Each structure stands twice: as structure tokens, then as C-alpha cells.
Image (cartoon, helix red, strand yellow):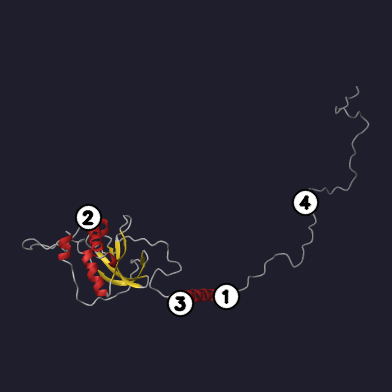
Amino acid sequence: MRDQHSQHAVRVTETVALTRLTRRDPPALGAVELTGRLHRDDAGLVYAGHHGGVDVVAVLLTAGAETDSYARRRFCDAVQELLDRDPDQVVLYDDDIDIAPWVAVRATSWEEGVDTARTLLAPVTLAHVAPTGTVQGPDFRPHWWGRDDAGRWRLWPLPWPRSLSQSGWWTFVASFALIVAIAALALWIAIKIFENSPAPPPGPGPGPGPNPPSTPTPSDTGPTTTDSGPRPTPDTSGPTGTGQPTPPIV
């Protein structure tokens, strides 16, 4: 397969356009800081990046290709062949099983980098294998065709305080100014609402100053009698302390 790979290396002659990264693209792969997209197909995505002040091209498998163990193996074999042929061209390489494999290669131009990237991605979809016999019927597509978003990637340690997107400092300044303006508008509306609201009517509450202590009323002390005559006095002539009534004298 390696001989076929070298014989059917894919070359491009058109001008390569550098486009912005999307929200699903990684801002960096390892120590490679990505600056834009160069190419995308069913097998992988090609990014422009920097590493140590040198322009590099990074190749990352798509979300569909990185789930296929055979596609991963063919891509890793293509990278290993490039390492055997020109080890100085490979800057960084990661084939961790938990993420999509990727590689960063040196390139004197973006066109040359895309040429190398297509050569590495051709074995993933078997595009480097020439058809046998007469081509008839529908074209071949892998079962993960259409899942062309970036595969799983890892970014550690987090690049704080560097931004994870292509937005500049003016974006953060504009966002902060918008938040301050909204807060000031909300405060002004609240002040106007309270200024125009009517004052509450005076209630029957206590007047100013401390309240005097309340005095009990006759109704609070129990029932009273209106009889002003003499009241009967208890008989104290009989025996006391027994609690028994005095028997009558016969």
C-alpha cells in the first residue's frame, strides 16, 4: 500500500484560500496555534498554523473518519511513511486513541502544505487506489461519509488568558460596554418608575413619637356591681378550721 500511496500522491495546482476558523474548529492542536482553514474533505481537515514562529500545516481527521479504526490505521501508516521518507518535515504528531489523530508538517507555501495533506488523507478514503476494471454504478463512499466536522481534539493546558476564538480585544470591549449600557438603562427605568408612582395614603396608625402606655379599661378587669349598699360579712362565730356546717339546736 505504501508503494501505491507514493505512486498516486495527489497534487493540486489551484490557489489555496485561507478561511476563518469556525466555532467547531480547535484553536490549537498541541503546541500548534491554528489561524485558519485551508482544505476539507470526507477524510480530514487541513489548517494553517504556527509553531515556534514557523508556518506549518496541520491535518486532523474528521468526526466520521476518526471513529473508523481502519481509516485511523491507514492515516497513521501514511504519516509513518512520511516520517521514514523525510523526518524533518513532520513537526508534531499525535495518534492518541482518545482523540482524532493529527499531524503538523512544514511547508514553504500553503499550496505545498495542502499537497502534502491530501497525500496523507488519500489512504483514509482509499482515493489513492486506482479503480480496477471498468467503472460502473455509483461511486464508493465510506459508511461515515457526511460527518465532515473536526474530530475529537484536546486542548490542555487551557490557553488562558488567550482567547479560544478569532475575536480580538475590541470584541470584549464592545461586549463590556454593551453590558454597562444595558445595566444603566435598567437603573434609569427603575428610578423613573419610582418617581412617578403616587405616595401611599396615610393610614390610622399611631402618631409621631413614642406611644403612651395603655391603661386597663373596666371591661378588662372583669364584671362590676352597681349595688352600693352594705355587703354581708361572713359569720365568724362558729367553729373554724373544720370545714363542717354547724348542726341545728333542737
Say which quarter of the image contains residue 144.
Answer: bottom left
Between the residue at mark 4 and the residue at mark 3, the CA separation in whole angstroms equals 72 Å
Q: Is residue 217 left or right of residue 143?
A: right
Residue drawn at x 77%, y 51% is 220
Looking at the rendered structure, the secondary structure element under dot 1 is helix
Q: Nearer the viewer, mark 1 or mark 3?
A: 3
Q: What's the residue type where badge 1 is placed?
A: Ile
What type is the residue that disc 2 sits on?
Answer: Tyr
Q: Amino acid at mark 3?
A: Ala
Depicted 196 relative to depicted 89: above or below: below
Q: Which mark is residue 191?
A: 1
Marks 1 and 3 sit apart, C-alpha to C-alpha, by 26 Å
Residue 70 circle label:
2
Q: Is residue 237 visible?
A: yes
Q: Looking at the image, which is closer to me, 171 or 34?
A: 34
Assess whether mark 3 and mark 2 are in contact (beta carbons under 8 angstroms).
Answer: no
Query: Which residue is label 4 attached to?
Result: 220
Within 10 Å of disc 2 (Cα), the crowding (few <14, some 14-19, many 20+) is few
Sequence order check, earlier mark of 4 and 1: 1
Q: Quadrant of the C terminus?
A: top right
Distance from disc 4 to disc 2, alpha carbons, whole Å, reads 98 Å
Question: Tag 3 or tag 1, which sits nearer the N-term?
Answer: 3
Residue 68: x %, y % from top left = 24, 56
